[in-house]
Every structure is written in structure tokens, then in C-alpha cells.
Amino acid sequence: MLSVFTYTLRSHRIGLLAVSVGLFLMSLIIVYTFDAFGGLDALADLFESLPAPMAAMFRAQAGFGTTITSYIALDYRHPVYIIAGLAFVLSVSSGAASREIERGTALMLLASPMARWRYLAAKTGVLVVGAVVIVTMSWLGSMAGTALTGVAGDVESGTLMLAQLNELGVLLAAGGIAMLLSAVSSDGGRTVSVTAGILTVMYFLDFVGAIWGPAEPLAPLSIFYYFDPLAIATNGTTLLRDIVVLFGVGLAGFVAALVLFQRRDITR
Amino acid sequence: MSGAEVQALSVSGVHKRFGNVEALRGVDLSVEQGEIFGFLGPNGAGKTTTIRVLTGFIRADQGAARVLGMESWGETVAIKARLGFLPDVVAFASGFTGQDFLNYVASLRGIRGRLPRQAELLERLELPDSALRRKVKGYSSGMAKKLALVQAMQHDPDVLIMDEPTEALDPLMRQELFAIIREARDRGATVFMSSHVLSDVEEVCERVALIRDGRIVGTGSVEALREGKARTMEVEFRELPSGALAIPGVEVLSQEGTRWELAISGDINEVLRELAKHDVADMTYERLSLENLFMGFYGEGGGKELADA
């Protein structure tokens, strides 16, 4: 099992490095360019003037907190953070089962005396470790930015860590869905496209639910509904509900993936 | 139950359906320990599905498949500890060198470093260190097949199941592989190999089973299967025989000028003696092809089955 974990981690190291270094730099630059936006007052004015849909994208409908911590946390909902993290998650999960079956590379490996669920569990481990690395690097980027700009004393690092824990929950929930689809499919491309489709629908459910009353009841069906770093920065704590739902979806997806992968036919 | 009593492989009444396609329709076969057994059939006959049922990759809808007395689906981990497997599709994840791949597969069996048997197999199958240091994505199909064969055999399995092992190998490598297979058998291993090339199976296997449309249509030695089935001979005469060729068990299939095509189901010596009486310019004799063998079983009569030979 350790061999599978090590090999899988090694095969995804470049992607993981690219995403985590990219998000580290993005986090750093966001803090570093803070003054270029004119400081907190100017940013607050900017968000006041934003159309509701734009504010909803950042979950800033209720206004923008006037702290640097809020400013940084707000950016954690930037689509680049979400897309980059999900790209890694999708890459690992589709490669974990369906792509290997599609290409025929799984057969010789699964002919070893190891239960299939253990094989997939090792790959799931890489997904979890990778997601932790990504959010940690994002947080470290923010910390490096605050240190470089001399505002470290004004930033609540623990709060930002909670915001990244919330992001980790999103990545794991998406990973659980993707891993489940990968475990039952023999087509890596289909796994990626179906998962991306589900996540896109979820993203817009959350978005539309935030700006259009009739769609509001549907928003809780989206994992992004439970991702609100600005609220964490404002309240200084994370909602237990969000953590339970996101980590619960991830765990349920991973467990279902292991069970179904163990029981399925490998036909290609 | 002692080891000697347990069959190496047994498949009993196995059915498998994929959607509307009934891939296996009650497959029965058994292989004794220490036997080299060939599994023959045309593409789509059910060879790979049967193999995947045996190796626990596919769960049978009905019936039972066992390897060394263990249930293929339920005890697959214990089986795989004693199994070497070569799949029909040889593909490697990108990024591996040949040596990395062998080490990785060995590590999945809890083995670290190079196995002594690995070095011997690499030498005999002519995969030098320089090839092993290269990325597998640059391998030719023949090299990829050799690497896959090494991974299947490097841990000296008790049962070796190989799906089309000779495909992509040149004639010299086929001979070397057959020698390796025989040596494995001599050490007590059981070898089960599928092929659609009758000559390969005939050369190395002691018994064979024929599968067609998801059913076993014959089991026995290749010679027993061939018995009574016609082979073809083309004869080019310099001068046409004055009369008809009156040889028992020979039928003239076609006659174009001086070139005759004969179907021979009797003793070949009778044919040669008769031909020696004539001025023959050229002659080709084809051993029975798998296709013709199947035609013999199914052909016009359809559904004819061979008793266990």
C-alpha cells in the first residue's frame, strides 16, 4: 500500500508542485498588492459598488469586512483558487481508477496480492495529502505576504487557517465525488467531464441561489454553499455545519468509492 | 485437502453477461497442477472473460471458478499471492522506466530489490540493462510484452495465467518463452495460456480447451482435436496426372490447370507415396489452422461438440 502511495505521489508531484506554488504566489501577491487597491476604505467602497452577482461570487453580499484578514479571506473564494485546487483533485481521482482501467495499466498492478480497496485507498491518501499541501501553501503564501508588507501583526493567521480548512473541505468533498465516479467508470475522460459538470452545476446552484430568491432552496445542494471564508474572517470561527457537510461528503464519497471499486468488474 | 488433490484451475458452469451480450454460457474446464494448458478461441469467443473470472477481475453471474482450490472472487488476494498474470493488454503507466516498473510490481508483493529470477528472465528474453533504464513509453510492442512477461514470472508463481503471451514476440523469443514455460512446469508450476494461434499452443501445451461463443466446444490434446479434421495441400504438377488421384481420405477441392488443392483427412504417407508417382513441381502443406479446426467443430453442421479427449 505504501508503494502505491509513494508511486502515485511521485507521479503527481509536478502537478501538485505547480498548483501549490502557484497558489502560494497568488496568496502572496494578493497581500502584496493590497495597497495598490487603495487600502481597506477604498476596497470597502469598491465592494459597496459591486453589482449583487459579483458580490455573490465572493459571498460578500452582506458587505466587506474592513480588516486585512477579511480582504485575504475574501480572495480565497476567487475562482482561481477553486479551479486550481479542483484540477489537482480531478487529476488524481480520474487517474486513480478509471483512467488506469481505460489504458489497461491497472491489470498488472491489481494482479498483486492486495485487496483492490487498499490500492484505491493509497491513491485516495495522495489526494488527501495533496489537498492539505495545497491549502497549506495557500495559507503560507498569505503569511509570507503579510510578513513582506509588514502587516503581519494586523492579520489573524488562525482565522485564515480556518478559512483554508473550509477550502480543504471543498477539495475533499469534490475529491470524494470524483473518486466515486472514477471507481465505477472505465473511462478517465468521462470521469473528468462528468465530475466537472457536476461541480459546475453546483457552483452555479450556489451562485444563483445567492442572487435569486426562487433558487435559494437549491443552494444547500451545492458543496460551495458551505464554503464561506469571508464569514469565517468576520466571525472569527468556522461553521461546524460547513465542516461536517464538506468532510462528510468527502468521506462518504471515498468510502463508497472503496466499496464499489472492490466489488466492480474490471472489464477492459 | 492435500495439494495433490486440488486442481490448479477449475471453472464450473460459469455464466457472465454484459448488458445484452452473454459472454460466457456455462463454461466448464479444469486444469491439473503441473500442466501446461492452452485455451484457444477466436476473438470475442470468451477467452479473456474466462481468464478474468479466474483471476478475480470479473465476478461470474453463475457458476464457480477456483484457483488452487480457492474461490476466484472471494479469495482473490490469497490466489494472487501464488499467481503470475499476463493480461491481454500490456500497458504501463507513464513515467516508469522498465526497472522501475519491475521494482514497483515486486514491491506490491512485498519484495524489495531485484529478484534472482528476474535477472535470469531478463537475460533470456533479451531485455538488457540499457533497455530497463529507458522509459517504458518508448518501448516497442515486443519489448513491452517481454517486460510484462518478466513481471508475471519473476516471483516464480505456482500458477501462471497468460492471455496471448506470444503476441508481438518474434519466433526466437517465442521459442525461448516456451522453454521458460516448460521449465516452470518442470518445477511444478501450472501454466494456463490463451491464444488464437494454434501452432503456439500446439508446440507447448499438453492439453487444450476450445471456446467459441462463450462455450467450451472441445477439450483434449491438440492431436486429439485434430483427429479426423482435414488439412489442405496445394500441389503444382509439371504434367497433369493422367487419371484421378485415388487416395483414401483425399478430396480434390479445386483444380486450376496444373495446380490442385487437396483436402487431406487420412494418412499423409499415403498421399506422399501417391504424389511420388507423378512429376511434382511444387507443393505446400498447411497444418490445420485454428479457423479450419473451428470450422470442423462448428462449420456447416453448427454446434457440434467434441467429447473430452
Image (tube, rainbow, N blue to C red):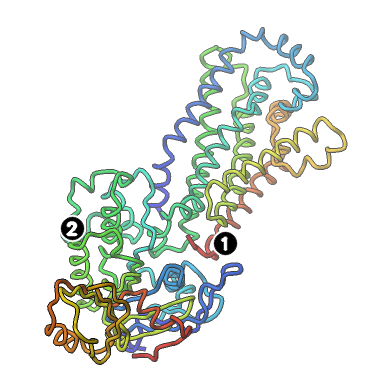
Residue A29 in the image: above or below residue B303: above
Front tag of 2 and 1: 2
Q: Which amino acid does label 1 sit on?
A: Val
Q: Nearer the viewer, residue B268 or B248?
A: B248
Q: Which of A3 and A80 is in front in this view?
A: A80
Q: Residue A259 got which mark? A: 1
Image label count: 2
Chain to which the residue tagged by mark 1 belongs = A
Q: What residue type is labelled 2?
A: Ala
Q: Furthest-front residue in view?
A: B242
Q: Position of residue A197 (x, y in %)?
A: 65, 42
Indicate the secondary structure of the residue bearing disc 1: helix
Instruction: Bin the neighbour count of mark 2 within 10 Å (Cα to Cα): few under 14, some 14-19, many 20 and up.
Output: some
User: What residue appears at the point 16 percent right and 83 percent down from the top-left corner?
Assistant: B275
Q: Where is residue B287 in the image (x, y as percent from the top left)?
A: 25, 76
Residue A157 in the image: above or below residue B31: above
In the picture, measured across the screen, residue B72 lies left or right of residue B162, that is right
**Which residue corresponds to mark 2?**
B119
Q: Which of A122 and B84 is in front in this view?
A: B84
Residue A72 in view in this figure? yes
Indicate the secondary structure of the residue bearing disc 2: helix
The answer to whether the residues at label 2 and label 1 have Cβ atoms under 8 Å apart is no
Chain to which the residue tagged by mark 2 belongs = B
The alpha-carbon separation of the residues under discs 2 and 1 comes to 38 Å
In the picture, measured across the screen, residue B160 lies left or right of residue A11, that is left
Q: In which quarter of the image is the N terminus of chain A?
A: bottom left
Residue B83 in view in this figure? no
Quarter-wise, where is residue B22 in the image? Answer: bottom right
Instruction: Bin the neighbour count of mark 1 within 10 Å (Cα to Cα): few under 14, some 14-19, many 20 and up.
Output: some
User: What residue appears at the point 24 percent right and 74 percent down from the top-left corner?
Assistant: B234
